[in-house]
Image (tube, helix red, strand yellow):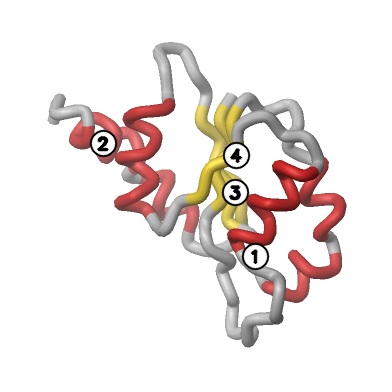
């Protein structure tokens, strides 16, 4: 299982940081997208990279960062194996990312 998470709101990530750092342990790989701000200003120390570091510090074995949907498809084209399940989580625009992900992976693999 590959979990792709787009944290929604800086305040939520800040308030639930410890929980976020430990809730993905059942996934083989976690891919962290930039925070979907939803109109909030950034909070110092609360970011995609902070969550990547927190996941690793909490013992997750394979954590990666992505910059956006184009990078995600290319990343998953390298990471995903046959029969892997990719789950996209978040409340921002990650739904749109997920809708085009299969085609993006195939294109990145040169099969489209």
Circle 4 packing at 10 Å, graded few (<14), some (14-19), many (20+), is: many
Q: Provide the residue designation for mark 3.
A: 5
Give residue 28's quadrant in the image: top right
Q: Nearer the viewer, mark 2 or mark 4?
A: 4
Q: Horizontal placement of 83 versus 71: left or right? A: right
Residue at disc 2, secondary structure: helix
Q: Provide the residue designation for mark 1.
A: 8
Q: Provide the residue designation for mark 2.
A: 103
Q: Nearer the viewer, mark 2 or mark 3?
A: 3
Q: Provide the residue designation for mark 4.
A: 63
Residue at disc 1, secondary structure: loop
Q: CA distance from mark 2 to mark 4?
A: 23 Å
Give the residue at x 59% y 31%: 29
Q: Horizontal placement of 102 versus 64: left or right? A: left
Q: Horizontal placement of 112 versus 72: left or right? A: left
The residue nearer to you, when weighing 25 against 12, is 25
Q: Horizontal placement of 16 versus 10: left or right? A: right
Q: CA distance from mark 4 to mark 1?
A: 18 Å
């Amino acid at each position: 299982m590959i979990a792709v998470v787009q944290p929604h709101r800086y305040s939520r990530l800040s308030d639930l940081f410890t929980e976020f750092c430990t809730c993905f342990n059942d996934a083989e790989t976690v891919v962290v997208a930039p925070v979907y701000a939803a109109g909030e200003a950034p909070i110092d120390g609360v970011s995609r990279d902070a969550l990547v570091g927190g996941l690793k510090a909490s013992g997750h074995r394979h954590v990666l960062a992505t910059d956006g949907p184009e990078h995600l498809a290319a990343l998953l084209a390298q990471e995903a194996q046959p029969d892997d399940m990719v789950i996209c989580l978040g409340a921002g625009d990650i739904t749109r990312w997920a809708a085009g992900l299969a085609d993006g992976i195939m294109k990145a693999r040169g099969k489209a």
